[in-house]
Image (cartoon, helix red, strand yellow):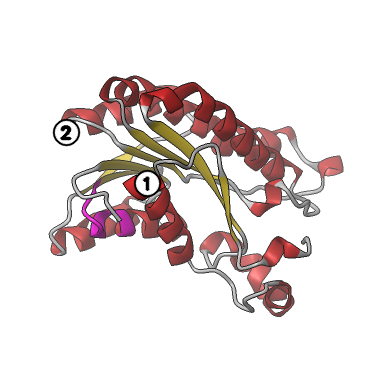
Amino acid sequence: MSIEGRVALVTGGSRGIGRCIVETLASNGAKVAFVYRSSKESADKVVAEQAEQGREVMAIQGDVANKEDADRIVKEVVEKWGKLDILVNNAGIIRDGLLATMEPDAWDAVITTNLGSVYNFCQAVMRQMMSQRYGRIINMSSVAAEFGNQGQTNYAASKGGIQGLTRCLATEVGRRNITVNAIAPGFIETDMTEAVRNAAEGEIKKRVAVRRLGKPEDIANAALFLASDESSYITGHVLVVDGGLTLGGI
């Protein structure tokens, strides 16, 4: 895929899917900055491992839910590398619980982190991408946005909002050669899904057409495609990467 010489920014890039996206973009020739909130040790490890491979990767600490942090991070990337071509909004959290008993803090935290961060960073990169007349924005949604799961009203609302934002923003910036797409993963083997997998991995696999759970690499490869020039005529699209999980509904 043609991303050689591109500059990318990935939120939530110190572990799981985000880390795999950082590694995949860097291994295909991009200079990559990623955002982490508190796991400095993990972030430093990613940077060190990529440096050993001769790849340019930079970790930046910040709170993706904070607009000022988003503006600062984007400014730092542009000042270091002179441009910003690819944005991957990957950061996200879960605070599952039935709506009837869900505390306001659990609702606010998920909406602000998952959906608010996408607004923060999309707006932060707009001026740069529009002036350079090039950009690839990739927002991480979820199959939960389309198929309801008990106890995930806040999470599903945040991911559904991301899909709506993606489609609308695509119409606003397409004339500037900026594409905006989303990826909707199914069950992926990460720390975030560990509890669910421990409780029902066998049952989940029975629902997946390819009879396996997804790996972070499956999502990272989709992100690589959407970040590349080969996807230049795709925008406002939600790419479902779930091994066929949702073919019959969750």
Mark 2 crowd level (few <14, some 14–19, many ≥20, 10 Å Cα): few
CB contact under 8 Å: marks 1 and 2: no
Q: Residue at x 23, y 43 (%)?
A: 6
Q: Give me the residue at 62% from left, 50% from top.
A: 142
Q: Secondary structure at mark 2?
A: helix
- Judged left or right of residue 79, residue 8 is right
Image quarter where the C terminus lies is bottom right
Which mark, residue 80? 2
Q: Is residue 163 left or right of residue 135?
A: right
The amino acid on which the numbered mark 2 sits, given as a three-letter code, is Lys
State yes or no: residue 25 in magenta: yes
Q: Which residues are magenta?
A: 24-31
- Magenta stretch: residue 138 in it? no
> How far apart, in angstroms, are the residues tagged by discs 1 and 2?
20 Å
Q: Position of residue 171 (x, y in %)?
A: 53, 26
x, y percent for residue 7: 25, 41
Q: Position of residue 112 (x, y in %)?
A: 58, 32
- Which residue is pictured at 21% across the width and 50% down the height? 4
Q: Residue at x 57, y 39 (%)?
A: 114
Q: Amino acid at mark 1?
A: Ala
Q: What is the x, y in percent for residue 204?
A: 70, 72
